[in-house]
Image (cartoon, helix red, strand yellow):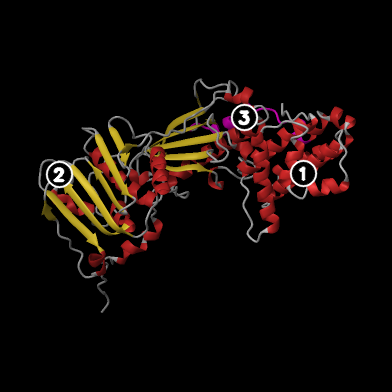
Amino acid sequence: MDNLPVDATPQKRLFHSIIADYSLLTSLCELIDNAIDHWLMAEASSPLEINVLLSIDRQVIRVSDNAGGVPSDALELLVAPGASRENVKKEIIGNFGVGGKRAGVALGERVEIRSRHANGPTYSIVVDNEWLADERDWSLTAKKISDISAGTTEVHISNLRQGFSRDQVVAFENRLSEIYSKFINPNCIISVNGSPVLQENFDNWAYPPDYPPRSAEFKIQPLEASDEVVTVKITAGLISDRNPKDGNYGVYFYCNKRLILAHEKGREVGYFSGKAGTPHPDASLCRVIVELSGRPELMPWTSNKAGINWSHPTFQLIRDGVIELTGYFTKVSRRTKTDRENSIFKYDSGEISPIKLDEPDSLKKIVSLPTPRGRKKSYADRLLDQNTHITKKMPWTLGLLEALSMFEVLAGKKYHSRNRLGLIILDSNLEIALKEFLVNSNQYYSDDKISKLFSKRHLVIEEIKKHITIDDGYWKKTSYYNNLRNKLIHERATVDITDYQLADFAEVVEHILGQLFGFDFSRN
């Protein structure tokens, strides 16, 4: 027999295979996406309300919307993998016909979907473990039940596969404010446990006259055999809402108004040698926002909309422009780090300058934009120069300054253990500085007295307080960071030191040494 029939009927275990790919956030966003799409397909004719209930006590989830409900002759859209609307409107969020179905199963062992189209009857469909276990039967029964509100769809999820805490609910609400910021308005309200989600936008630009934000708008054709286009808007600049702790810089992607990826700092968007370099707090003023609009199949998102498919033709067509803009504003960020208050942050209003990215040699024009001059002398070197008068008068302080210069040099290295080494240098240098201050004061301290004092950090601090007044907040921080150093040395577990912690401790040490010896730590 030359030809054999092949059974291509899908198996229900495909639902289980994707559970690991979905978190609470990605799953619930799929259900929210469905509601927004249904609303958009109806031309957004009336205000949309999406309500997400996350019961911490009962560990159940309910997502409801008033987008119009699903007609009785289209109920398969709610549960059939791959089933999607035939007449797909441009610029909706859904695409693959599986998101909402697998998202519900990923969250809980029992999913009940209730829908009432307009003023018609209400139907309920239940997907549970019993149905999933029966590989032979794919049919489901839509039961007519008591009416819910007209034009409403409700998804009830129970027997959760993974529970959630109050902190997770707060984090979820915060992420929704970012993901759907371009949808949220008086005509599109998303609520979590009764509280409306607020907008969190990222276009918080600074407008320095020489380096204003730049924006390009153009169209591309990702598919050679098609004349369908994607509208592209890329805006790049220096930001005024820098938060080193959160690392809120890098590249942001919106597809059809939905945030897909935030603060991306990978090689694909320019973070490599010769362009934006290695992510570092010095580069934290650079932000690039990419907005793509078009038919959902042309969007470069991954299937769960939690990332970008870097090999997608749409991204490949804009990749070089994104990299050049990321590299340019990162360079400006690094070169203005010594006086950002005066050169960047004070310019809190202005206009975005247009730039062409769809013309020949447009990338060369980005490279040739003016940038600040590099510093002739590093801060580590200038630190010693600007305090020469002090080290000549008090030669025992030279080593303290040189240690801080070493710390500055270390901060620019790519060592994996850089932050740990930095913590040790700062804390050791602070301890030596406190000793030098006491032994060179007008009061005599014997070796035995010094030894006893420095056996406990709090004894040293109490002694220093007899000579000089420094805000207690700084002393509390020194104790905190000294404890971190002790954990590194005396405990089995190795603690992680973040960039934010190290920068904060450096500021504390500089303040205390400035009070003790009169050092000038200005970076201008």
2 or 3: mark nearer the eye: 2
Report, in whole angstroms, how far the alpha carbon at label 2 lies from the one at label 3: 58 Å
Magenta residue span: 358-380
Residue 107 appears at what percent x and percent y? Answer: 33, 56
**Residue 463 in which image quadrant:** top right
The magenta stretch spans residue 367: yes
User: Which residue is nearer to you in this view: 453 or 28?
Assistant: 453
Picture residue at 58% right of the left edge, 30% below the top: 365
Mark 2 residue type = His
In the rendered view, would you say 416 is above or below 398? below
Residue 176 appears at what percent x and percent y? Answer: 38, 41
Residue topped by disc 3: 368
Image quadrant occupied by the N terminus: bottom left
Question: Could you tell me which secondary element the residue under label 2 belongs to?
Answer: loop
Q: Of the numbered discs in the image, which one, if any, rests on residue 431? A: 1
Report, in whole angstroms, how far the alpha carbon at label 1 lies from the one at label 2: 72 Å
Can residue 6 be seen here? The reply is yes
Residue topped by disc 2: 117
Point out the tag, 2 or 3, that comes first from the N-terminus: 2
Report the magenta stretch's main SS.
Answer: loop
Question: Could you tell me which secondary element the residue under label 1 belongs to?
Answer: helix
Residue 408 appears at what percent x and percent y? Answer: 73, 40
